[in-house]
């Protein structure tokens, strides 16, 4: 212990003698450790940390699929859920739920809340006790009773001030009386960021088997594997398909662990970014190792004297490693502080609905990771310089004047190897960033099928019970749109059930069968169902390809009509004119609809091909109480938000407006899953390139300093400035070429893991690789130019003294 304390004291004195070296080394390492710690914090919180429920690995989400119809993700029907509950051998509980919004009134204050209707099995399945009161029970769903509601901890604190008398308090939900029966503990917000839970009865007798609107979550029995449960579900669904041919043919269920269903799409991006910051840390370590090698040159005489006085090589290595680890620990503390800012930055640029990002925080696992990385980094960048420095040539070193350390071939080889590794790692990061940038630019060049500029969108929901389905709803919505159109600055306005590009949180699909084909499950094809008002295509500037658009004459009494997109027209009537053709919305409508128009495709996701879409006049399908209003404006759309809301209030003050956004926001949100990895990987690649540039500059400067005498001799013998520049630059560019060559091989091996993040670009893209190689070569040239020019200005007389 005494020896360790002496080594620490000596190391502190040694570092304080060169404050410039200390600042540069700590800053470089702190940047690498901080970025790595921040990314591990995100990965740990989002991917590794278990969900906040007892035995979360047993909680499984159901996803309805129908490969025959091309449906990869669907909700489920109440009758199917009840059959699964009764027949399953693999699950303790199977619960159904649906999500949406409710309007809560307490006195004169009305607020829209995120809500879920849940079956009686929901809360027992999660095994989470309420903070106060009770959870929902089966008899809460009985008719004639005030609606029982459980509220979240956040809502209790925000709306009710955290008072203890909230349980049994009367409130109003959607205009109907309700009573708060329980408060859930902090952190329980499933599904999503839910704020209220109300009873949902699974009554199979009152629901159609093909009305798939319910989400399903379950808990496996102890000892049952996912494979066993999937086999059990497949068997039950095959039996249901045999018993209910019209509704269940082709339908099955895919089981996914709940945590995986929440964060599975983020896994690849986060792990790639964690690997990227690990590369940045390695480059930082290589930089500091080069700094230590340069510093060791000035300590050769000191090390030689200690060795001559009897210090063993192991003793010298221990002293040098102690200094390295001490330097790394200081950098680790600074990096941990820096990581707090990095984490805030990461969460700030992430979409607000990103799963589990609200749970991100530093815990003991992060501290342990940072400590391990810090010690490992200290050993990593300190070991090679320590081994290199601990074996001095005593005769040569002690004869030296002590003004400069003697250059050794071994030290140059180690420094060159470190520089080559920095360039190679930088090439891999830059190549990955280049591929993502090219992919993102390609994605942004694609048209979503509509013009998003100057379009404002908001959600409208009719007060429950005030307007009956059919003509009353069609009339009030028409009045709302007409009043909005009169607002100064509004060019056009329309209504739609679901915004394109997933701008709304739900998507309604319908099965259709062409006229003349048998009404059987095998004949149906699935299409997105979109009730709209007449000016929808004009407002979003969706091109009309054939036929006509809807008019006010397309109402409940007129011929039932439909407009299809180009994809649906090609699918149902290949190489035929679809105008005048008819089809039936199977099992939802008892009459055929006539195709009166064909419009361009609009995308539900920027990186996916558009599916089949059918548009119907809302006046002919006025069953929906909630629609999105889209408004095209002459100027900045958000500046008219207040005026549009006032126009709506002038028609009916009870119609709430919410989810205000512009369609450019919708496009940006759709691109976010690819934009954020691109930005972060580009930032990491930029930092890596900067560190490599500084490392090359430092090594080249050291090379010039150590060869000052030789350069002076060359110039005294007639070497020109150009010859000296070539001497310095040739060596640096040779190292760059070797590093780029190794980087190309590494990039070919690594970039294939980016495949899921790329769009329209192959993992091995020649143009990108060549561009990155040129950029790195230019960076190396610029980094070496200053030391090379300094070498060319050496005075031979001064150098030879």
Image: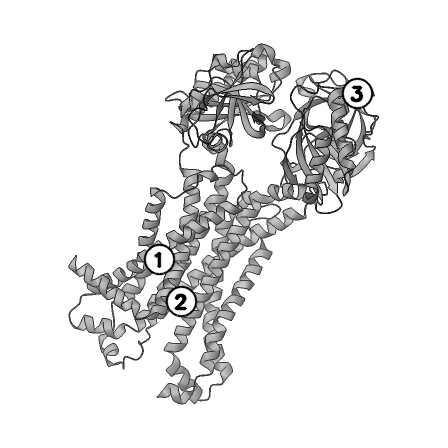
Image position of 585 with respect to 404: above or below = above
Q: Residue furthest front?
A: 108
Residue 459: mark: none
Crowd rating for badge 2 (residues with CA inside 10 Å; few <14, some 14–19, many 20+): many
Q: Earlier in the sequence, mark 1 or mark 2?
A: 1
For marks 1 and 2, give the CA distance. 25 Å
Q: Residue 641: x, y in percent?
A: 68, 40
Residue at image coords 56%, 18%: 177
SS of the residue under disc 2: helix
Residues drawn in magenta: 576-580
User: In the image, which is nearer the foreground, mark 3 or mark 2?
Assistant: 3
Residue at image coords 66%, 24%: 463
**Which quadrant would residue 20 be assigned to in this image?**
bottom left
Image position of 389 with respect to 594: above or below = below
**Which quadrant would residue 573 be assigned to in this image?**
top right
Q: Residue 777: x, y in percent?
A: 52, 66
User: In the image, which is nearer the foreground, mark 1 or mark 2?
Assistant: 1
Crowd rating for badge 1 (residues with CA inside 10 Å; few <14, some 14–19, many 20+): many
Q: Earlier in the sequence, mark 3 or mark 2?
A: 2
Q: Mark 2 = which residue?
A: 416
Image position of 146 with respect to 412: above or below = above
Q: Where is the N terminus found, in terms of image quarters?
A: bottom left
Residue 556: mark: 3
SS of the residue under disc 3: loop
Q: Residue 586: x, y in percent?
A: 70, 19
Along the line of sight, the residue nearer the viewer: 388 or 461: 461
Residue 575 visible in image = no
Crowd rating for badge 3 (residues with CA inside 10 Å; few <14, some 14–19, many 20+): some
Residue 331: mark: 1
SS of the residue under disc 1: helix
Q: Main secondary structure of the magenta part?
A: loop
Left/right placement of residue 569 relative to residue 122 reads right
């Amino acid at each position: 212990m005494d020896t360790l304390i002496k080594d620490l004291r000596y190391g502190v004195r040694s570092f304080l003698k060169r404050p410039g070296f200390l600042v540069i080394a700590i800053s470089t390492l702190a940047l690498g450790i901080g970025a790595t710690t921040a990314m591990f914090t995100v990965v740990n919180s989002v991917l590794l940390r278990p969900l906040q429920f007892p035995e979360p690995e047993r909680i499984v989400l159901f996803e309805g699929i129908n490969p025959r119809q091309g449906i990869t993700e669907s909700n489920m029907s109440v009758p199917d859920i009840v059959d699964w509950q009764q027949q399953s051998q693999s699950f303790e509980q199977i619960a159904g739920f649906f999500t949406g919004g409710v309007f809560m009134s307490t006195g004169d204050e009305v607020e829209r809340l995120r809500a879920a209707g849940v079956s009686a099995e929901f809360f027992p399945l999660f095994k989470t006790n309420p903070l106060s009161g009770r959870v929902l029970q089966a008899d809460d769903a009985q008719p004639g009773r005030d609606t029982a509601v459980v509220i979240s901890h956040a809502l209790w604190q925000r709306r009710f001030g955290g008072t203890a008398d909230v349980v049994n308090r009367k409130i109003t939900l959607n205009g109907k009386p309700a009573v708060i029966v329980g408060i859930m503990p902090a952190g329980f917000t499933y599904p999503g960021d839910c704020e209220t839970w109300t009873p949902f009865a699974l009554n199979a007798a009152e629901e159609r088997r093909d009305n798939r609107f319910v989400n399903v979550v379950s808990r496996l029995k102890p000892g049952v594997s996912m494979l066993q449960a999937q086999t059990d579900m497949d068997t039950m669904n095959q039996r249901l398909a045999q018993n209910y041919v019209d509704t269940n043919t082709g339908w099955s269920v895919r089981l996914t662990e709940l945590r995986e269903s929440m964060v599975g799409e983020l896994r690849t991006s986060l792990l790639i970014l964690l690997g990227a910051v690990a590369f940045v840390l390695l480059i930082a370590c290589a930089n500091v190792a080069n700094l230590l090698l340069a510093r060791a040159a000035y300590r050769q005489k000191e090390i030689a004297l200690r060795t001559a006085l009897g210090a063993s090589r192991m003793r010298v290595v221990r002293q040098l490693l102690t200094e390295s680890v001490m330097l790394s620990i200081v950098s680790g503390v600074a990096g941990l502080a820096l990581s707090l800012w990095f984490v805030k930055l990461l969460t700030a640029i992430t979409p607000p609905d990103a799963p589990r990002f609200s749970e991100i925080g530093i815990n003991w696992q992060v501290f342990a990771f940072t400590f391990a990385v810090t010690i490992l980094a200290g050993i990593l960048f300190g070991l090679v310089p320590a081994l290199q420095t601990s074996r001095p040539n005593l005769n040569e070193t002690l004869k030296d004047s002590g003004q400069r350390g003697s250059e050794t071939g071994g030290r140059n080889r180690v420094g060159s190897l470190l520089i080559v590794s920095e360039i190679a790692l930088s090439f891999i990061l830059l190549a990955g960033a280049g591929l993502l940038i090219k992919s993102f630019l390609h994605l942004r060049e694609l048209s979503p099928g509509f013009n998003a500029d100057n379009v404002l969108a908001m959600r409208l929901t009719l007060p429950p019970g005030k307007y009956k389905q059919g003509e009353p709803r069609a009339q009030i919505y028409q009045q709302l749109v007409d009043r909005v159109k009169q607002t100064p600055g509004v060019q056009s306005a329309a209504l739609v059930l679901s915004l394109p590009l997933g701008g709304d949180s739900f998507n309604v699909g319908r099965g259709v069968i062409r006229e003349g084909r048998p009404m059987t499950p095998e004949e149906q094809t699935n299409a997105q169902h979109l009730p709209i008002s007449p000016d929808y295509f004009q407002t979003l500037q969706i091109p009309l390809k054939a036929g006509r658009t809807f008019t006010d004459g397309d109402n409940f009494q007129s011929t039932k009509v439909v407009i299809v997109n180009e994809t649906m027209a090609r699918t149902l009537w290949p190489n035929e004119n679809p105008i005048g053709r008819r089809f039936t919305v199977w099992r939802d409508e008892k009459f055929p609809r006539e195709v009166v128009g064909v419009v361009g495709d609009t995308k539900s996701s920027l990186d996916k091909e558009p599916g089949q879409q059918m548009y119907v006049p809302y006046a002919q399908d006025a069953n929906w109480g909630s629609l999105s209003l889209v408004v095209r404006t002459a100027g900045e759309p958000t500046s008219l938000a207040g005026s549009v809301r006032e126009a709506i209030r002038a028609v009916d003050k009870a119609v709430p407006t919410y989810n205000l956004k512009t369609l450019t926001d919708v496009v940006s949100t759709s691109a976010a899953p690819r934009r954020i990895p691109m930005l972060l990987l580009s930032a990491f690649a930029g930092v890596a390139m900067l560190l490599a540039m500084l490392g090359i500059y430092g090594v080249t400067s050291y090379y010039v300093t150590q060869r000052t005498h030789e350069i002076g001799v060359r110039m005294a013998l007639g070497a020109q400035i150009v010859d000296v520049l070539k001497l310095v630059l040739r060596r640096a560019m040779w190292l760059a070429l070797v590093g780029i060559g190794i980087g190309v091989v590494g990039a070919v091996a690594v970039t294939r893991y980016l495949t899921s993040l790329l769009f329209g670009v192959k993992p091995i893209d020649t143009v990108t690789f060549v561009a990155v190689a040129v950029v790195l070569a230019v960076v190396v040239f610029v980094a070496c130019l200053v030391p090379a020019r300094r070498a060319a200005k050496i005075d031979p007389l001064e150098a030879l003294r």
